[in-house]
Image: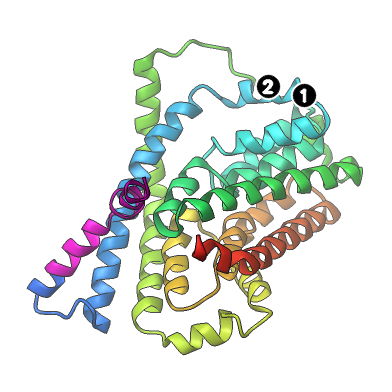
């Protein structure tokens, strides 16, 4: 059983066979696949191909599932629940919407305009970019299934806790008046055939691939530089166990950036290989995917500064706590 799990982790999800193939190609080109230049090229080719292949397969599957949950149906489902159950459901529904933080905000506006409780809409807004089915599989390909599952579970906890706290604070008056006053635009229901669903999934895959491709290239490029050119001692000194503020620094560094999880994974992979602690790496990923500067600018158009500040504070605090938790349990995760 252990051998099967190892094969699935390394050869199917991790695609280590592809890494070995890239090493042979780099060597055939007259470069050392373990050297700086050859290693950078090997890392770039391997991670780019791996992420794009996994991304294509995942988006097809996720988009097919998403075809059963258009925004109007999602709104109706959420409207049937109240309290903590509604927050939990909103966070879970966020996992089947593979959107970046900016793409999630129009849905957040629509749900708020439809009269859903503010805390419920914020649980969705936090969960949607931070945690999705694609992130689960991609994280498994790098960190293993234990880390991937725990990352998703803790991301959902942040989403539920954050939305619940915002609801308890009673900040409905902090939503811009035009959001509450606007009428929700609904689309007449229609029955999709299986062909329609597969067509929708294919269109979503190609559209998403075009949008994330530049971020994947940038992320893999940065990862290649970190992996092969930056001394390990620098990474360990700044983000290793010797710096108790590593999680805080990673969170604050990641928050202003704009990328999705597909662009941050190669950077995280390179940082971890260089000796950065697991919690530091995952805190960076969570901060990048949830708190990008462009998304906060868009969100400011829908909510007032006090609510925006509360949202940022809740997310930053949650990400930092998760980062330190992963640092604390990293030896246990490695040992089992």
Q: Where residue 262 is drawn, which disc sits there?
A: none
Say which residue appears at 27% left-offset and 55% top-offset. 49
Residue positioned most to the front: 1
- Compare residues 88 and 163 and report the one nearer the observer: 88
Residue 160: quadrant of the picture = top right
Q: In this view, does 309 lie to the left or right of 197?
A: right
Q: Where does the image place residue 302, in percent across and percent down from the top left?
A: 75, 45
Q: Where does the image place residue 159, in percent across and percent down from the top left?
A: 70, 46
Say if the magenta span includes residue 4.
Answer: yes
Q: How crowded is mark 1: few (under 14 residues within 10 Å), some or many (20 or more)?
A: some
Q: Is residue 115 left or right of residue 157?
A: right
Q: Is residue 240 above or below residue 192?
A: below
Say if the magenta span includes residue 291.
Answer: no
Say which residue appears at 20% left-offset and 76% top-offset. 33
- C-alpha span from label 1 to label 2: 8 Å
Q: Where does the image place residue 251, in percent across and percent down from the top left?
A: 64, 68
Q: Is residue 172 above or below residue 32?
A: above
- Report the predominant secondary structure element of the magenta stretch: helix
Q: Where does the image place residue 279, in percent across and percent down from the top left?
A: 60, 67
Say which residue appears at 61% left-offset and 38% top-offset. 94
Looking at the image, can residue 177 be seen?
yes
Say which residue appears at 75% left-offset and 20% top-offset. 80
Name the element at disc 1. Answer: loop
Q: Where residue 81 is drawn, which disc sits there?
A: 1
Q: In this view, does 194 lie to the left or right of 162?
A: left
Residue 183: quadrant of the picture = top right
- Compare residues 234 and 79 and report the one nearer the observer: 234
Q: Where residue 77 is drawn, which disc sits there?
A: 2
Residues rendered magenta in the picture: 1-24
Name the element at disc 2. Answer: helix
Contact, mark 1 vs mark 2 (Cβ under 8 Å): yes
Q: Is residue 195 left or right of residue 323?
A: left
């Amino acid at each position: 059983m252990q051998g099967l799990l190892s094969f699935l982790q390394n050869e199917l999800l991790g695609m280590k066979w592809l890494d070995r193939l890239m090493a042979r190609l780099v060597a055939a080109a007259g470069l050392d696949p373990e050297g700086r230049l050859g290693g950078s090229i090997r890392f770039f080719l391997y991670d780019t191909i791996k992420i794009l292949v996994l991304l294509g397969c995942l988006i097809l599957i996720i988009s097919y599932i998403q075809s059963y949950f258009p925004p109007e149906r999602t709104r109706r489902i959420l409207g049937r629940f109240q309290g903590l159950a509604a927050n939990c459901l909103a966070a879970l529904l966020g996992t089947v919407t593979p959107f970046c933080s900016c793409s999630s905000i129009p849905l957040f506006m629509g749900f708020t305009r439809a009269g859903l409780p503010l805390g419920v809409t914020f649980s969705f807004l936090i969960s949607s970019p931070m945690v999705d089915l694609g992130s689960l599989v991609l994280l498994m390909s790098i960190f293993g299934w234990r880390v991937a599952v725990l990352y998703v579970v803790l991301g959902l906890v942040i989403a539920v806790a954050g939305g619940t706290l915002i609801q308890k604070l009673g900040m409905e008056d902090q939503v811009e008046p035009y959001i509450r006053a606007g009428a929700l635009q609904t689309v007449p229901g229609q029955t999709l055939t299986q062909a329609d669903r597969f067509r929708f999934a294919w269109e979503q895959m190609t559209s998403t691939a075009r949008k994330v491709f530049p971020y994947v290239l940038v992320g893999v490029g940065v990862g290649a530089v970190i992996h092969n050119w930056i001394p390990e001692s620098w990474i360990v000194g700044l983000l290793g166990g010797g710096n108790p503020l590593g999680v805080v620094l990673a969170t604050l560094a990641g928050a202003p950036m704009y990328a999705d999880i597909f662009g941050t994974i190669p950077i995280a992979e390179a940082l971890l290989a260089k000796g950065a602690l697991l919690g530091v790496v995952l805190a960076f990923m969570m901060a990048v995917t949830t708190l990008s500067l462009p998304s906060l600018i868009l969100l400011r158009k829908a909510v007032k500064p006090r609510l925006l500040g509360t949202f940022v504070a809740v997310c930053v605090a949650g990400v930092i706590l998760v980062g330190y938790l992963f640092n604390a349990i990293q030896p246990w995760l490695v040992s089992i």
